Amino acid sequence: MDYLLSLIVFSPLIGIVLLLFVKNNQKQTIRWIALGTVLVQMGFTALLAMRFEFWTGARVLTEAFQAVEKIRWISLDLGQAGRFAIDYHVGVDGIGFPLVLLSSLILVIGVVASWQLQKQVKGYFILYLLLSTSIMGCFVALDFFLFYLFFELMLLPMFFLIGIWGGPRRSYASIKFFIYTLLGSLLILIVMIGLYLAAAEPGMAGSKVVHTFNLLYLMDGSNYLPDSMLSPGAGAILFGHPARWMAFLALMIGFAIKLPAVPVHTWLPDAHVEAPTAISVILAALLLKVGGYGFFRIAYTLFPEAAIHYARPIAIFGLISIVYGGLNATAQRDLKRLIAYSSVSHMGFVLVGLAALTAEGAEGAMFQMVSHGLISGALFLLVGVVYDRTHDRLIENYSGLVSRMPGYTVLVVGVFFASMGLPGMSGFVGELLVLMGAFGSQEANGLLPVWVGFVAISGIVISAVYYLWTIQRMFFGKYFVREEKWEPFMKDLSAREWVMLVPLMVLIVMLGIFPRLLLDPMNETINLFMAHLTGTITP
């Protein structure tokens, strides 16, 4: 055990300790400590990437994890009721690995994007580094309790980062974000407690039952107590439906709020509009992916039969998110709100890809999450560029920016095209695989009708409408800005802004041209994931 994942997760805490000894007025020192901390975290992540094996020869999903660390964290003797155990258990596979890499990059870019912050700099970066730990922890946790701990820990720093450093309606947006996410967390908590009561560590015959939160044990139906409500063979009924189906729905709602999916999406546009630029980047690029990751790691793997049963309703909610989010984006005047609704639309593809229950659909859903993380991060950074200069985001207040900001225009057009799925960019690959899964589902397993794919395609058409219309209004035609006082600030990208944006643009193009860079690390795990869901492979 080399503790590499622990170093990735907890290295930001060292930065927090260092910041506690720095005076509040030493702003530049605070910034450099924060940047150095996330760069160290990125260095550990790079080491993980060099050690990660694409093909491990695993026969089942539970064997696919690498860099595993497992230590008994909490253990209580409950007398006749058995024992209570929580493990510090972390590991990474082809589903978590790409998201860890994405997180390390976005967290570094977020510090660079926050470089000009002047208000309460020390408190901001302490909360930022705490958020970094919680995000990484979610993507590597293999104990349900540990996952839930990191999942809840994200609430605190995000609430204050929006509520203190946000826009004019920051209090409303932060409270709305907190309440929505907390309600989803409570549903997840109920299921977690139910699973704890239902399952036990294997090999405990003739001794006390050891109840567990270990996700690898919870994936195996043989580890459930036969008389428990959530045991796969118990057939328990709750509210007129199988208890396991109801538990799956509770998890889906909890993670759908985080994704977010319609109709539990309304917190997202408000949070994005009010959040500082760097926090909008992290919110779109990483926090939404925790919801999608929860579908993969917990909801689908623990309740595969319920995932199959509810495949069509899940796909329909994905389609509603795609179309409704796109139509709302088309109607927006605020550039940041437009991108927020586009995120709702594009994350709908994740639900459709999962619902297809095909290898193409699942690979597409994962690819879409990583691709959207890069694209949405770049989009919110680009919005921040004009907002830093004018403190205005209304599309109608700009025109002909190509004449004053040609470099900025090139990047905006490139990222817009990537988001609408232009071939040769990462957005195209993710959506193509999801559509292949949706169209192929009818023949592969009979779960989704062909019309699901046709409706999903309409989302791509809608995205072209609002992106092309925005490009036409803001960047072409006669040069115009609403306020004369903005004129001295309407300059092209600075060196710091190029440093933030170029790596994202390079990766967007690289993954579009060489999708194997992302598909190969996840391919083995996705195949095992699909085998686990369909039961085609046995240990």
Image (spheres, helix red, strand yellow):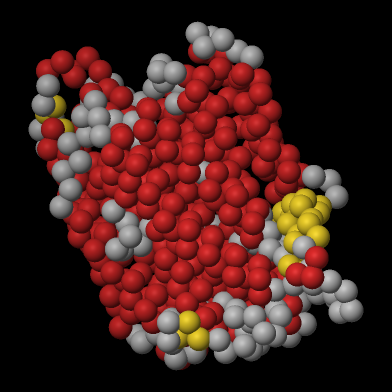
Work out which quarter of the rendered image holds the C terminus and state it. Answer: bottom right
Instruction: Give how far across and how far down residue 419 sits, in percent.
Output: 35, 53
Residue 101 showing in the rendered view: no
Quadrant hosting residue 318: bottom left
Residue 362 showing in the rendered view: yes
Instruction: Give how far across and how far down residue 89 sits, in percent.
Output: 74, 55
Q: Nearer the viewer, residue 324 or 247?
A: 247
Residue 255, compared with residue 229, is above or below; it is above
Residue at 49% from the left image edge and 39% from the top image edge: 156
- Which residue is outermost to the front? 80
9 relative to 448 in the view: left or right:
right
Q: Which of 344 and 162 is in front in this view?
A: 162
Instruction: Give how far across and how far down residue 399 sits, in percent.
Output: 14, 34
428 relative to 503 in the view: left or right:
left
Residue at 56% from the left image edge and 17% from the top image edge: 30
Question: How many numbered discs sit on the rendered protein?
Answer: 0
Q: Which of 181 and 350 is in front in this view?
A: 181
297 relative to 217 in the view: left or right:
left
Residue 54, compared with residue 277, is above or below; it is below
Residue at 52% from the left image edge and 26% from the top image edge: 125
Instruction: Give how far across and how far down residue 67 sits, in percent.
Output: 77, 53
Residue at 43% from the left image edge and 44% from the top image edge: 283
Residue 432, compared with residue 530, is above or below; it is above
